[in-house]
Image (cartoon, helix red, strand yellow):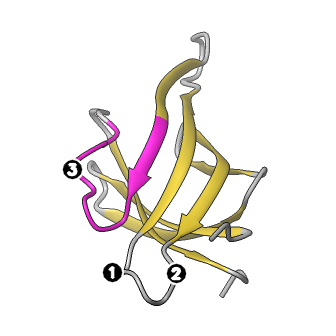
Amino acid sequence: MDEPFATLRALDKVTAQVKRLSVKVGDKAQFGTLSIKIDACRKAPPEDPPESAAFLEITDARPGQTPQLVFSGWMFASSPALSALDHPVYDIWVVDCASDAT
C-alpha cells in the first residue's frame, strides 16, 4: 500500500547525533550535508508480514563541491543492510511508512 509519509532515522557518525525524520513523499529533508528526497513509500498490507520500503534519492552537497548523488534506490525497514547508504559520515535508514507525519 502506498503511504504519504516516510519515517527515517539519520545518524551522524562523527557527533553521534541521531535524528528522526518524517518526510512527505515528493518532498526533501536535510540532514547535515545530505538532501534526502522521498519518491515513494510502501507498506505491506496487514495480512502480510510487516515490511516498509521507500525509494530514496540522497544527494551530498558539501560546501565548495558539486552536489553528488550518493544513493538512489529502495531501502527496506526490515533489512537496512540489504540496500544501504555507503557514506563516511552519515547513515540513513527507513523505519516505517505511515499515513500521517506522527
Position of residue 16 measured from the top left corner of the image (x, y, whole percent)? 28, 61
- Name the residue beneath numbered marker 3: 81
On the rendered structure, is 61 left or right of 95?
Answer: right
- The residues tagged by marks 1 and 3 sit, at their Cα atoms, a distance apart of 19 Å
> Where is the N terminus found, in terms of image quarters?
bottom right
- The residues tagged by marks 1 and 2 sit, at their Cα atoms, a distance apart of 8 Å
Mark 2 closeness class: few <14, some 14–19, many ≥20 residues within 10 Å? few
Three-letter amino acid code at the position of disc 2: Pro
Mark 1 closeness class: few <14, some 14–19, many ≥20 residues within 10 Å? few
Res. 49 mark? 1
Number of disc labels:
3
Position of residue 75 measured from the top left corner of the image (x, y, whole percent)? 41, 50
Direction front: furthest residue: 47
- The residues tagged by marks 3 and 2 sit, at their Cα atoms, a distance apart of 23 Å
Q: What residue span does the magenta drawing correspond to?
A: 73-85
Mark 3 or mark 2, whichever is nearer to me:
2
Task: Tell me what residue is drawn at x 65 percent, y 88 percent.
Answer: 102
